[in-house]
Each structure stands twice: as C-alpha cells, then as structure tokens.
Image (cartoon, grey):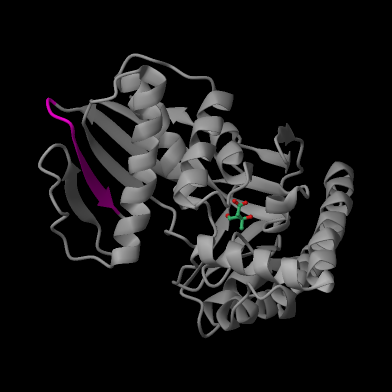
C-alpha cells in the first residue's frame, strides 16, 4: 500500500474571482487528508472514508458487474467522495497506462468536506500521489497539481481554477493567476478558523457567480475589484503588514457577500471575529456555508466564535510549509 497526505487551505484573498483569471492567494494549512491506495486483483474501486463526515462510510463500486453502492449516506456526500476519488483514479490510470487496475482506497481527513478548506483538492492530490506510487511511478509536485486540477475540473463541470490543487500539492502560501502558479513568501500568520458545520456546493456557487457576472456589469466590476484587493494583499504580504492584510480581507468578504456567496452563519462568524478585534475576517472557499478565516494573534476571536450561534467549531491553524507528503 502507498499512503500520502496533502494539506487543506484557506484563501487569504481571491476565491471565485480566480476562476475568471484574477489572481488569488490561498495558504496551505496543517489540516490534512491522508489517502492510502492498494492495488486490487480486480477492476473495482473500494472507498473507505473515516472522519470525512461525522459517520464515515465504505463503498465498493465499478468493475464489470457495476455494483450500486450499498450505503446509507447522503447522495451529495457520496457523490462528492466517490466523484473526486473516481476522477483521481482515472488520472492515475492514464498517467501509468494501467487502464484496468482496481484499488482499495482509504481516506482519513481532518478537513471537513465542502467547507472551504480544500478537502476535495487535498483528497485528489493525496490519492493521485499514492495511486501512482502504488504502481511504481513517482510524480513531481507540479505534475500532481496539474492532474489534481484536471480531477476538480472534470468533477466541477469545467468550473475550477488551479488554486486549491496547486496549493495542496506544493504547500505554503501561493499565488495563482490563470495557469501561472507559484509559491510566495508569507509572514507567520495568526490564522483562526470558524466552522458552521455546513457545506456549500462549489459547482452551484461558481455557476451563480458566473450568471451574475454575465448579467450585470457591476457584478463583473466586483470580480475585477476582488482582483485589485488581491494585488494590494500581495503587497501587504510582502511588507509583513498583518493589519493591512486583515483590512483587505474585510473588503474581500464584503465583495463576496455582494456576489451572493456568503450566508447568515458565515456573516455571523465574520462579525464575531471583527467584534473581537481580529485584524480581519472573511469566508474562505466557495462559500454558501462552511468556514471563515480570521487573523488574530490573541485568544479573543477563537473564544468569541465558540460563543457565536451557528458556529460549530473554532480552531487555530498553522501554515503548512509542506504540500503532498509521502508517508508509506
Ligand atoms: C473553491 O475552493 C474556490 C473557487 O474559487 C473555485 C475554484 O477556484 O476552483 C470558488
């Protein structure tokens, strides 16, 4: 068996706008997905997921008999888990030329599913690395990032940027603009995450922004303005100016909210962080529900979030310098 891990991420700036060629700055965090992949004697894929949802599940499918998954979890959770794993396995098959190989796949994740912390990118990156290594091929991080991007692109009907997958594969803070992906220097950031226990549907949220942008010039201008915020944010990162970063994150949240991708609980958590004197706070990822990211070196934001109705969990996150990790 080959076992790999890959980190989740938070967006300091630029989600959604990155889909239209604006820059974005996501940062990898030390919350990881670990994926074990073992070759089978047949063509089937068996996925066992622990901690991916509160309940976890096992599903076996594929092969010539086309078994229906026989499990009791929500369809969207199943589709999310099997969709990304399926596509990652296709990438493994295509890169190794072993088109008929089957696998037992075990997923263990610290990252809540669909909550804006890059769970699908982390699972795709770790699965591609472990799957290819199980078949005797070791890929460079950039190639894994590219294959994981194709995985997200397929599952999300062509609506994905390279940001999540590049960040998860390489680790650290990264800057993505179109196909140009690079790691950048970042100061030690006092990252606090608030989680409302929910999830957003990335595909639907990206489509909604796309429609809005096509219909209204002001929505298109809003997307451009997010790009402007990102450029200012890059400067603040370079200067190590955490207060300015926070201020810009507040602006970024306002514009995401205007594009309709925030939610009552995300707004409540953002305001709790602001009232606790965080440098700044915003939703992270596609929105609709899930997580916010705040910058606060004190305990105040974490404590305030824990008392915020609608916030299920609040925790501090460290920047992950390492991307994909080979564990076995
Ligand atoms: C999702 O984590 C981030 C989005 O910008 C979509 C993408 O970049 O693929 C909303």
Q: Residue at position x 28%, y 68% from top?
A: 74
Indicate the quadrant where residue 272 lies: bottom right
Magenta segment includes 36? no
Instruction: Note whether 168 is above or below 43 in the view shown.
Output: below
Asked whether 138 or 92 is in front, the reply is 92
| Ligand 1 image-quadrant field | bottom right
Residue at 33% from the left image edge and 42% from the top image edge: 86
Q: What segment carries the magenta color?
A: 41-50
Instruction: Write the residue at 65% across / 71% down.
Output: 301
Q: Residue furthest front?
A: 215
Q: Is residue 315 above or below residue 233?
A: below
| Residue at image location 50% in from the left, 68% down from the top | 200
Residue 211 appears in the figure: yes
The percent position of residue 76, horizontal first and vertical second, equals: 35, 64
Main SS category, magenta section: strand
Give the side of residue 47 with respect to residue 147, left or right: left
């Amino acid at each position: 068996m080959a076992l790999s891990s890959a980190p989740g991420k938070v967006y300091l700036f630029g989600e959604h706008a990155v889909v239209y060629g604006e820059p974005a700055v996501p940062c990898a965090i030390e919350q990881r997905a670990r994926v074990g992949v073992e070759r089978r004697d047949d063509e089937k894929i068996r996925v066992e997921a622990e901690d991916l949802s509160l309940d976890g599940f096992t599903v076996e499918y594929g092969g010539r008999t086309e078994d229906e998954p026989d499990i009791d979890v929500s369809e969207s959770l199943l589709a999310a888990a099997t969709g990304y794993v399926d596509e990652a396995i296709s990438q493994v098959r295509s890169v190794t030329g072993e088109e008929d190989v089957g696998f037992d796949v075990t997923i263990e994740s610290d990252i809540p599913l669909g909550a804006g912390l890059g769970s699908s990118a982390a699972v795709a990156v770790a699965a591609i690395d472990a799957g290819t290594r199980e078949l005797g091929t070791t890929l460079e991080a950039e190639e894994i990032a590219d294959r994981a991007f194709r995985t997200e692109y397929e599952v999300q009907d062509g609506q994905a940027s390279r940001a999540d997958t590049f960040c998860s594969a390489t680790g650290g803070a990264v800057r993505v603009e179109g196909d140009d992906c690079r790691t950048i220097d970042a100061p030690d950031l006092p990252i606090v995450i608030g989680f409302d226990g929910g999830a957003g549907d990335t595909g639907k949220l990206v489509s909604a922004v796309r429609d809005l942008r096509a219909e209204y010039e002001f929505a298109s201008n809003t997307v451009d303005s997010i790009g402007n915020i990102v450029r200012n944010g890059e400067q603040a990162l370079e200067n190590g100016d955490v207060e300015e970063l926070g201020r810009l994150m507040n602006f970024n949240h306002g514009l995401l909210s205007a594009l309709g991708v925030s939610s009552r609980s995300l707004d409540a958590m953002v305001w709790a962080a602001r009232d606790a004197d965080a440098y700044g706070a915003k939703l992270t990822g596609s929105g609709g529900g899930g997580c916010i990211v705040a910058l606060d070196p004190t305990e105040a934001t974490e404590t305030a979030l824990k008392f915020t109705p609608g916030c299920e969990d609040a925790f501090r996150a460290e920047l992950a310098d390492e991307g994909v990790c080979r564990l076995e």
